[in-house]
Amino acid sequence: MQLKASWPRFLILAAALVAACDSRPPVTRHQFHAFGTIVTLSFYGADASQSAAALAELRAVYDEVGLDWYPWADGELRSINEAFAVSECTSVQPPLAGLIELSALHEQLSGGRFNAGLGRLSEIWGLQPVPVDRASLPDAAVIGELIDSAPSASALRRDGASWCSDNPHIMIDPGGIAKGVVLTISAGVLGQHGIESGIINIGGDLLVVGTVNGREASIGIRSPGSDTPIAGLDVRPGEAVVTSGNYERFVEIDGRRYTHIFDPRTGYPVDHTVSVTVVDSDPALADAAATALLVGGPGEFEAVAASMGLTYALLIDAQGDARLTPAMAERLHWVDSSGIVEQQ
Ligand code: ADP
Ligand code: MG
């Protein structure tokens, strides 16, 4: 299937659109900022004390993760990266150690398209710690030297809790997988507080816990240009819907936009793909895979989806054309069917 070429380069965000129902259990919604984005928690059928306790715990977890997993905050990951930068060994404790291991696993599964060792690139391109526009591109020789050294999470050596790097270019940046892992942790917190039904939405990356009013949650994939969703799908209990987009964070260099997602093979930001949405019962896989598919682009869509074991994925390229896995094509309902033409 193909989206009409005349469609503008639209932003795609996943938005929870819960189908109307007369006998709805009470819904509690909490919205706040975390991880540089908006978090929306919707709890269905939970009483006030359950909701308050779960909210307090989640906010505490998010604060901790925001400090200790973000390389540019003054927390655990920052000191770990400082040790790697001078080729010193350092102790890495759970859960950060697990996050780095998981990153290395997804690096392997994605054939290196997902790479959580590229924090330096975000700095070189002026995207971190805050995007700063500039007049000229970064020095190609600097990018080349970094890429030639092959920095990545799987290049680290580990002896128990002690982790070592021989490559001073390695800077662990789990930004491409952290939200997925946080979704999994969040579902656990809901379970501990007896909340059986809810949607955790971290800036459009979301996880559905249980059913909503006894039904699958109807999730819209929408263009913020208009509030009308372009497509929708019914999300099963325990499934995550994760989108990576080249529009979320970017810098302008000499009048042109460069996104925050890099091809680890070149060190340059991706420009061939606008967004990727992955649905999976493993939110971390969905997150890493959305990033990897965005890097791979339309030409590598099938290969990367297969190597990462994905069933449901959608990619929109820079021309506005869509690629879908067969199961996603069956599941997705194009809301505005006038915008769709059959390709084959
Ligand atoms: P989003 O921020 O839209 O949720 P991602 O999940 O793709 O998108 O995460 C993007 C972040 O991942 C970047 O800001 C950067 O920190 C990091 N990153 C950039 N390129 C890669 C890559 N090829 N592999 C893994 N992480 C990446
Ligand atoms: Mg990701």
Image (cartoon, rainbow, N blue to C red):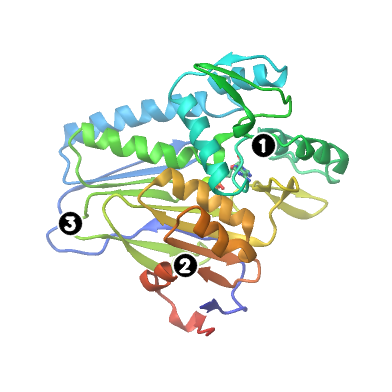
> Where does residue 250 sit, x and y in percent of width and height?
67, 48
| Residue linked to disc 2 | 325
Q: Quarter of the image holding residue 166? A: top right
The residue lying at 45 percent from left, 37 percent from top is 33
Q: Is residue 341 above or below residue 286?
A: below
Q: Earlier in the sequence, mark 3 or mark 1?
A: 1
Between 208 and 126, which is closer to the camera in this rendering? Answer: 208
Q: Secondary structure at mark 2?
A: loop
Of the two numbered discs 2 and 3 in the rendering, the one whose residue sits closer to the viewer: 2
Q: Earlier in the sequence, mark 2 or mark 3?
A: 3
> Where does residue 262 sit, x and y in percent of width and height?
68, 47
Of the two numbered discs 3 and 1 in the rendering, the one whose residue sits closer to the viewer: 1
| Residue linked to disc 1 | 118
- Mark 1 Cβ inside 8 Å of ligand 1: yes
- Mark 3 Cβ inside 8 Å of ligand 1: no
Distance between the alpha carbons at the discs numbered 2 and 3? 29 Å
Q: Is residue 125 visible?
A: yes
Q: Is residue 253 above or below residue 168?
A: below
The amino acid type of the residue labelled 1 equals Leu
Q: Is residue 299 left or right of residue 18?
A: right
Q: Is residue 167 above or below residue 90?
A: below
Q: Earlier in the sequence, mark 1 or mark 2?
A: 1
Of the two numbered discs 1 and 2 in the rendering, the one whose residue sits closer to the viewer: 2
Between 284 and 201, which is closer to the camera in this rendering? Answer: 284
> Where does residue 293 sit, x and y in percent of width and height?
57, 56
